[in-house]
Image: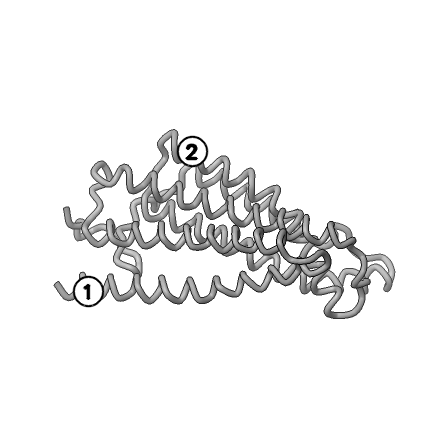
Amino acid sequence: MAPSSHALIGPDGFQLRGTAMSRVDGFSDVVFGFALTLLVVSLEVPKTYGELHELIHGFLPFAVSFTLLLTVWYAHYFFFRRYGLHDVGTIVLNAMLLFVVLFYVYPLKFMFGLFIGQVAGYVDANQLKPHEGTELMVVYGLGFTVIYLLFFALYWNGWRQREELELTPLERKLTKIYMADHLTMVAIGLLSCLLAVVLPLGEAGNAGWVYLLIGVSKWFYGYYGGRTTRSFSSI
């Protein structure tokens, strides 16, 4: 069934079925807002120059962590805009995703604060013991993996209800592409965890270079999705 002439269509050609704010959307935004609050360097106005200096040191790690968390919110936003689902399965998966996001904030903030601090020279490079570096990379990687595994599950739930949602042939093809995209992210997270475990103690941080594959993955699926949309538009 083709979208009605009054339907809102996204840039990828997907009909936006979830344009109205729901209680699930509102609750999710509150949780994401709270997660962003947990990233803040300090909730208090600095009273001394030393406190201000420490606050400045925390700005770049906060900016990186904020950006990464914002990408998760953006992916969440577009899922609900595309499918507008509020069934029990979606609510449960969404609750699990929000739970992991709240926990994920802590290793996210700590890891980038440590990494940027070491690069800038104001954090001791030997602050972590070798086995602690391995544990940190594994915890971060598992959080990353679970988040995108839950996104895959949300899209799979949407695919499962494709008849009820009356997804068009283009939307069905794009749904498969989005699921593959998130599974690739899961694979990247698992690969980083594996490398963190097998690399010699003290070198687990090198497993973080695996995340550069995210850029390649996003380019590939963006290109493939765009080509798919154009091919259907020309029919």
> What is the crowding at mark 2: few (fewer than 14 residues within 10 Å), some, or many (at least 20)?
some
Residue farthest to the bottom, as pictured: 120
Q: How is the image coloured?
A: one colour
- Distance from label 2 to label 1 (Cα)? 34 Å
The residue at the point 40 percent across, 45 percent down is 152
Residue depicted at 74% across the width and 64% down the height: 117
* Left or right of 62, for residue 129: right
Observer-nearest residue: 214 or 158? Answer: 214
Picture residue at 50% right of the left edge, 46% below the top: 147
Q: Quadrant of residue 201?
A: bottom right
Helix, strand, or loop for circle 2?
Answer: helix
- Pointer 1 residue: 231
Residue under the image location 80 percent in, 66 percent down? 122
Task: Identify which amino acid the numbered label 2 is placed on.
Answer: Ile
Q: Quadrant of the C terminus?
A: bottom left
Can you tell which mark lies on residue 83? none
Comparing 207 with 117, the one in front is 207
Judged left or right of residue 82, residue 72 is right
Q: Residue furthest left?
A: 235
Q: How many marks?
A: 2
Which residue carries the number 2 mark? 91
Q: What's the amino acid at mark 1?
A: Ser
- The quarter of the displayed image where residue 34 is located: top right
Indicate which label's residue lies in the foreground, 2 or 1.
Answer: 1
Q: Position of residue 107 (x, y in %)?
A: 66, 49
Q: Is residue 125 above or below residue 6?
A: below
Q: Is residue 173 left or right of residue 23?
A: left
Looking at the image, which is closer to me, 100 or 44? 100
Find residue 168 and report its horizontal and vertical position in percent: 19, 49
